[in-house]
Image (tube, rainbow, N blue to C red):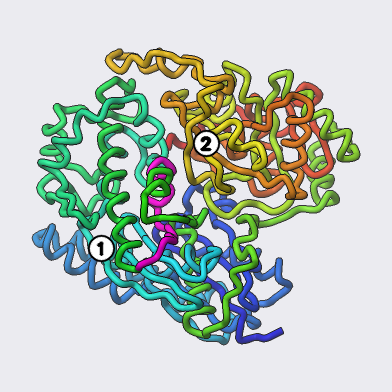
């Protein structure tokens, strides 16, 4: 093995820490620290993820040649000092405590390596935040050359960047700096509407179709100026930029007639309208940015990364722009993906290893831990579970029949997904034709708000027969409307004070995955894929004529996606799932006793 090509990328100390191991220009493994610690978006040094990556490759810490941290501490310190000096110059002691805490983590990265990897004797290097994001998108993409757009809250200084990648080289061409940030702007509205920053942005996007964008003029006149190239100027008088948990101030609240919502407050129509408005503003900005990125790079290809790239509604509209022919979005577009990007950047841009765009470098984003049947059986027997072990044909028959009976099934197979979406290996599935399935899965299994939509997984060969879309979308990062033939027209009452009237309306023959605006966040599954999930979809299609299943992540709200068999068994036993298909084993809930039952399970995870 060529030791010069053993590279460990690390993202840590802000949110969603992770590690990724690159060996001989290939991704050996990558995973989120939260999956091991069971702390959502865990920001600690990712020692568990690192240990898994090394164990999976049969390596020791002394085998690593390069460790790459995902951002530049010097640039970050420069922003912190200057920002504090500008926005709160009189709070000297508070500023000092914040900077001291930061110096003890990111600025002291070497000490963490020495503590957790004492035998490491290679080089420690530093990337830049947006370079790491850009690399995570371009290098795994199938493009030989491409424009690159990175949009998030803030890195060191950058909040959005336009780059260009060709061959094994990446260059950042333009960037916009803090505090002019679409990510921060979107997060401010997320928190204002009662959702948690850095995790509740999905909720705001899901809430938007229930509203009318009647506040867009106010937002553009008062809060943000949008330039033709997509760059923005944010009015700082409406924000607390140094408080990421409550970014807006009282002037902001007054502007929107005191609509501030606490997390447990009822959602009213005005909240939906405000969500619709900031979503529309965000789309307008991203459309301008993406078009401009392709224009100045003279490329019809576009790679996307950064937390804002997870806005699948905007992504669908970006793809429809005239000068954009193809897009590729990093499935781990948040900061977790920066560990992968940092490693890939050093491997390709610095060492100058040659790329091979004909291979699937991302490996379907199945880059995490895997458990053998022997290991799974050990967990099942240790906790006295009742189960059957069947051949695959028998299991598929049981699963298909159970789905048709309206049962909800947990899936635990092969490698865990990298990124926030479960893609069939750590998933909960159901029949999308069942009219109350969305409500049941939201309230009784995920324990989350009933308005949140579920994503469909669909066989690629059947995609255009059910959706107004005909491109591969394997990572659930693009939305599409269902076709007109399966729509059921319903009047949307966007003046009611109770949005439940719209949530429970049947809008298509696939009601559980059809959102209020007839959209769905699609996951395409290639028919040639040999995975268990593909076989389940194919069997269900053969039996029912429907090539679509609900696919949502195997967890409850605020819980990380299950990683180990123990995590899966505990989640299964403390929700209303009916079956668990884990390895080669099938468990029926009604055959179990109180194994791993925990009356405080739901309460152990805070609202997100």
- Residue carrying label 2: 604
State which quarter of the image contains the C terminus: top left
Question: Is residue 303 a member of the stretch shown in magenta?
Answer: yes
Q: Residue 342: horizontal and vertical position, in percent?
A: 47, 71
Looking at the rendered structure, the secondary structure element under dot 1 is helix
Please indicate whether residue 165 sits to the left or right of residue 254 in the image.
Answer: right
State which quarter of the image contains the N terminus: bottom right
Q: Residue 326: horizontal and vertical position, in percent?
A: 47, 56
Q: Is residue 439 visible?
A: no
Q: Residue 8: horizontal and vertical position, in percent?
A: 56, 74
Answer few, some or many: residues within 10 Å of disc 2's Cα (few below 14, many 20 plus, some between 14 and 19): few
- Say which quarter of the image contains residue 262: top left
Please indicate whether residue 111 sits to the left or right of residue 280 in the image.
Answer: right
Image label count: 2
Question: Is residue 435 a member of the stretch shown in magenta?
Answer: no
The residues bearing labels 1 and 2 have C-alpha atoms spaced at a distance of 30 Å
Instruction: Name which residue lies at 26% across and 38% down.
Output: 278
Asked whether 592 or 293 is in front, the reply is 293
- Residue carrying label 1: 97
Q: Is residue 318 above or below residue 606?
A: below
Answer few, some or many: residues within 10 Å of disc 1's Cα (few below 14, many 20 plus, some between 14 and 19): few
Instruction: Name which residue lies at 70% across and 75% down.
Output: 59
Of callouts 1 and 2, the N-terminal one: 1
Q: Is residue 499 above or below residue 48?
A: above
Q: Is residue 453 visible?
A: yes
* Marks 1 and 2 in Cβ contact (< 8 Å): no
Q: Is residue 138 above or below residue 283?
A: below
Looking at the rendered structure, the secondary structure element under dot 2 is helix
Instruction: Name which residue lies at 22% across and 54% down.
Output: 242
The range drawn in magenta is: 298-314
Instruction: Name which residue lies at 30% across and 32% down.
Output: 276
Asked whether 205 or 100 is in front, the reply is 205
């Amino acid at each position: 093995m060529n030791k010069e090509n053993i590279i460990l990328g690390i993202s840590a100390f802000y949110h969603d820490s992770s590690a990724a191991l690159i060996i001989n220009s290939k991704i050996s493994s990558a995973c989120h620290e939260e999956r091991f610690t069971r702390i959502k978006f865990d920001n600690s040094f990712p020692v568990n993820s690192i240990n898994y990556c090394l164990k999976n490759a049969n390596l020791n810490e002394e085998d690593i040649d390069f460790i790459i941290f995902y951002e530049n501490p010097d640039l970050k310190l420069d922003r912190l000092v200057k920002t504090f000096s500008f926005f709160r110059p009189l709070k000297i002691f508070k500023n000092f405590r914040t900077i001291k805490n930061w110096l003890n983590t990111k600025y002291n990265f070497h000490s963490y390596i020495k503590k957790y990897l004492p035998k490491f004797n290679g080089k420690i290097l530093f990337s830049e935040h947006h370079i790491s994001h850009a690399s995570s998108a371009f290098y795994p993409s199938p493009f030989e050359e491409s424009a690159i757009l990175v949009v998030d809250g803030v890195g060191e200084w950058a909040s959005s960047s336009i780059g260009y990648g060709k061959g094994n080289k990446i260059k950042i061409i333009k960037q916009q700096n803090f505090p002019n940030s679409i990510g921060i702007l979107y997060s401010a509205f997320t928190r204002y509407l009662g959702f948690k920053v850095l995790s509740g942005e999905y909720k705001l996007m899901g809430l938007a179709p229930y509203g009318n964008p009647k506040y867009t003029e106010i937002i553009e006149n008062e809060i943000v100026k949008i330039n033709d190239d997509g760059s923005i100027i944010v009015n700082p008088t409406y924000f607390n930029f140094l408080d990421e948990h409550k970014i807006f101030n009282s002037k902001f609240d007054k502007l929107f007639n005191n609509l501030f919502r606490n997390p447990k407050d009822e959602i009213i129509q005005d909240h939906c309208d405000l969500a619709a408005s900031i979503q529309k503003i965000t789309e307008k900005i991203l459309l301008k940015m993406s078009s401009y990125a392709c224009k100045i790079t003279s490329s019809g290809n576009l790679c996307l990364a950064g937390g804002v790239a997870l806005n699948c509604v905007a992504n669908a509209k970006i793809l429809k722009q005239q000068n954009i022919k193809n897009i590729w979005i990093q499935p781990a577009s948040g900061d977790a993906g920066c560990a992968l990007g940092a490693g890939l950047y050093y491997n390709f841009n610095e060492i100058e290893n040659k790329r091979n765009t004909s291979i699937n470098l991302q490996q379907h984003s199945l880059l995490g831990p895997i458990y053998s049947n022997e290991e799974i059986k050990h967990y099942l027997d240790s906790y006295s579970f009742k189960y059957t072990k069947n051949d695959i044909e028998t299991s598929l028959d049981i699963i298909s029949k159970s789905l048709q009976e309206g049962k909800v099934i947990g899936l635990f197979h092969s490698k865990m997904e990298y990124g926030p979406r479960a893609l069939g290996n750590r998933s909960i599935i159901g029949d999308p034709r069942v009219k109350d399935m969305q409500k049941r899965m939201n309230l009784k299994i995920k324990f989350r708000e009933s308005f949140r939509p579920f994503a469909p997984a669909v066989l690629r060969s059947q995609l255009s027969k059910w959706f107004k879309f005909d491109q591969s979308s394997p990572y659930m990062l693009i939305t599409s409307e269902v076709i007109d033939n399966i729509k059921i027209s319903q009047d949307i009452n966007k003046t009611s004070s109770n949005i439940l009237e719209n949530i429970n309306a049947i809008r298509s023959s696939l009601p559980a995955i059809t959102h209020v605006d007839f959209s769905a966040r699609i996951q395409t599954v290639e028919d040639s894929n040999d995975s268990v999930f593909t076989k389940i979809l194919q069997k269900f299609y053969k039996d029912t004529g429907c090539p679509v299943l609900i696919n949502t992540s195997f967890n409850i709200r605020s819980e990380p996606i299950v990683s180990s068999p123990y995590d899966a068994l505990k989640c299964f036993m403390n929700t209303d799932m009916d079956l668990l298909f884990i390895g080669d084993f099938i468990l029926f809930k009604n055959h179990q006793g109180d194994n791993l039952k925990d009356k405080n399970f739901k309460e152990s995870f805070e609202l997100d």
